Image: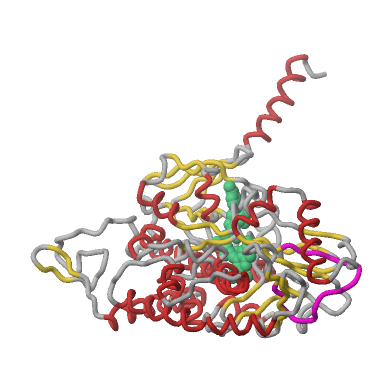
């Protein structure tokens, strides 16, 4: 028979063991299993570095690619477009190889209704045409400023210089649909240089594909993960919430909420910029100022897609429906989910998107209150007799502690130096990758490339090649060009570095460096 003490101590010891979690040692820790994390781990694996562990807080892979069941359909509440449908875009290459259903977005397939519900589509096209010249002027200005090394400016200022001063509700709606709806933020805070010279559009083209595949957009990440993780592979640990990251010259130790401890030579942090800015994860010691500055300069846009399921369809047949009301960005852009190439007729689902403050406001209120607002707008457009929806889905990306927003939007002034700070590892041990750390910011392919980039850097170091040390501030008056890490083309004049101002040279380097990034990512992923 058990003694009195053993009856108390044995269960206590068992409890302590369970609560303390596991202790694991590995070469590389990948923190987060969204696109960047899975891309990093896959690249490590493909290069023969199989000793890694992925820690993910959710019970699934995919991160901001997230499918749910709604109204009898699989819908994506996170990313749902492929931006740039060229075979050079790895995301499109995967979507194409899996024959994923969807349609190429057609912005001309649109119906526009005003605050009285009248069809004002011809007026929309006229105002849209008047935005052409200011848009071209903004692009030319971006090219010129980039070529001559002049600083960035807000997109709003460039549009104003091009003669765009939206005053009417229609002009505001046109601007909103063209800019806010893309960047997730107003032109006032978006960058002219990075936005207008967006390498995703320059390299992969401007066409966009909206997915409606029943497997969900996340299928491509699931397939990437399956390509290197066996059924119950212990290198992928779900439901592991990272709370502390201790770093130093000799490696990294990560603690999770369940008391587990993981040590490694290197770690790849792929949490969203919103999560990093929220201080939900403690870094010990705190991150250096240069890294904190870079992280805090990336904006986390809020983009909320609200789905509604009705008993019957009463809206226009066009792919897009725009509501031009008095309030800018108030339930402005709608998507008819039954338009050609999307869901079949009879699905009765419509989607409306909110951005920024409007999205934040809706996140904070009840779904019933949001539904009432939406129905008031729909009744303006389609009359008082339309039915109430049977169901509504309002995602809350900013309130979610695993994301704290929707996607990265680079604000004004993220120049090459800030980019270096974003990408440089801390102490040569702690690497950062995600949709906020590279030039394809805010896109899925950005997260893909960034994961592959850091895996390449770690792989090179582990194989005895040069190891990335960390950020070194630009040294003025140095022996240029070789010793200057700010601009290798710089020369010395009177003891200070002079940077080239020739337009062709700078544009060439900007595009070529983006291209090299793409090719390098592909090449690395093809390595076995
Ligand atoms: C509403 C919306 C619409 C979008 N639309 C598009 C689009 O149409 N096209 C496009 O290309 N992109 C779109 N995006 C952006 C795209 O989804 C992201 O750029 C991409 O998914 C980011 O991948 P990531 O790996 O960098 O980050 P994430 O996907 O955020 O991955 C990070 C992972 O870290 C995990 N994590 C966070 N905190 C912790 C912690 N403490 N411990 C452990 N794990 C943690 C998270 O759960 C997550 O899985 C959209 C995003 C949203 C939200």
In the picture provided, is 283 more to the left or to the right than 1? left
Residue that sits furthest to the top in the current view: 4
Which quadrant does ligand 1 occupy?
bottom right
Return the residue nearer the eye: 205 or 16: 205
Q: Position of residue 209 (x, y in %)?
A: 65, 79
Residue range highlighted in magenta: 306-322
Quadrant in the picture for residue 391: bottom right
Q: Is residue 211 above or below residue 264?
A: below
Q: How is the image coloured?
A: secondary structure
Q: Is residue 353 above or below residue 272?
A: below
- Please count the marks in the image: 0
Return the residue nearer the eye: 380 or 390: 380
Query: What residue do we see at 62% from left, 52% from top?
Result: 398
Query: What residue do we see at 18% from left, 60% from top?
Result: 476
In the picture provided, is 210 more to the left or to the right than 93? right
Residue 465 drawn in magenta: no
Q: Position of residue 369 (x, y in %)?
A: 78, 51
In the picture provided, is 128 more to the left or to the right than 510? right
Question: Is residue 294 something that shows in the picture?
Answer: yes
Q: Position of residue 35 (x, y in %)?
A: 58, 64
């Amino acid at each position: 028979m058990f003694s009195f003490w053993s009856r108390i101590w044995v269960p206590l010891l068992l409890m302590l063991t369970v609560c303390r979690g596991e202790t694991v040692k590995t070469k590389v820790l990948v923190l987060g299993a969204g696109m960047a994390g899975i891309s990093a781990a896959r690249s490590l694996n493909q290069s023969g570095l199989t000793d890694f562990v992925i820690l993910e807080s959710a019970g699934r892979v995919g991160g901001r690619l997230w499918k749910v069941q709604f109204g009898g359909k699989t819908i994506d509440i996170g990313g749902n477009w492929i931006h740039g449908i060229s075979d050079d875009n790895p995301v499109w290459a995967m979507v194409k190889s899996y024959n994923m259903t969807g349609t190429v977005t057609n912005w001309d397939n649109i119906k526009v209704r005003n605050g009285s519900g009248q069809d004002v589509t011809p007026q929309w096209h006229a105002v849209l045409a008047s935005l052409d010249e200011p848009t071209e002027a903004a692009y030319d200005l971006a090219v010129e400023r980039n070529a001559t090394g002049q600083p960035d400016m807000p997109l709003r200022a460039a549009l104003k210089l091009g003669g765009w001063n939206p005053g009417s509700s229609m002009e505001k709606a046109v601007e909103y649909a063209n800019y806010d709806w893309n960047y997730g933020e107003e032109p006032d805070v978006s960058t002219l240089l990075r936005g207008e010279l967006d390498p995703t559009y320059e390299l992969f083209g401007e066409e966009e594909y909206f997915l409606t595949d029943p497997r969900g957009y996340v299928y491509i990440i699931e397939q990437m993960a399956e390509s290197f993780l066996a059924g119950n592979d212990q290198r992928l640990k779900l439901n592991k919430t990272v709370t502390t990251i201790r770093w130093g010259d000799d490696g990294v130790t990560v603690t999770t909420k369940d008391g587990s401890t993981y040590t490694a030579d290197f770690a790849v942090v792929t949490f969203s910029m919103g999560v990093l800015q929220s201080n939900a994860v403690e870094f010990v010691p705190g991150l250096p100022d240069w890294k904190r500055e870079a992280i805090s300069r990336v904006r986390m846009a809020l983009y909320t897609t609200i789905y509604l399921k009705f008993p019957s369809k009463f809206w226009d047949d066009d792919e897009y429906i725009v509501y031009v009301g008095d309030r800018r960005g108030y339930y402005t852009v709608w998507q008819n989910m039954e338009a050609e190439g999307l869901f079949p007729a009879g699905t009765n689902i419509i989607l409306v998107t909110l951005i920024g403050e409007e999205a934040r406001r809706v996140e904070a209120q009840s779904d019933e209150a949001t539904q009432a607002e939406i129905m008031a707008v729909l009744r303006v457009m389609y009359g008082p007799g339309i039915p109430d929806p049977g169901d509504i889905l309002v995602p809350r990306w900013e309130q979610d502690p695993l994301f704290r927003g929707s996607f990265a939007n680079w604000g004004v002034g993220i120049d090459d130096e800030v980019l270096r700070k974003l990408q440089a590892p801390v102490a040569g041990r702690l690497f950062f990758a995600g949709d906020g750390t590279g030039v394809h910011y805010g896109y899925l392919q950005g997260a893909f490339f960034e994961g592959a980039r850091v895996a390449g850097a770690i792989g090179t170091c582990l194989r005895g090649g040069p190891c990335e040390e960390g950020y070194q501030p630009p040294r003025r008056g140095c022996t240029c060009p070789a010793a200057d890490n700010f601009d290798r083309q710089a020369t010395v004049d009177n003891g200070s570095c002079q940077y080239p101002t020739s337009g062709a040279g700078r544009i060439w380097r900007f595009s070529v460096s983006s291209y090299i990034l793409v090719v390098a990512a592909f090449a690395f992923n093809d390595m076995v």
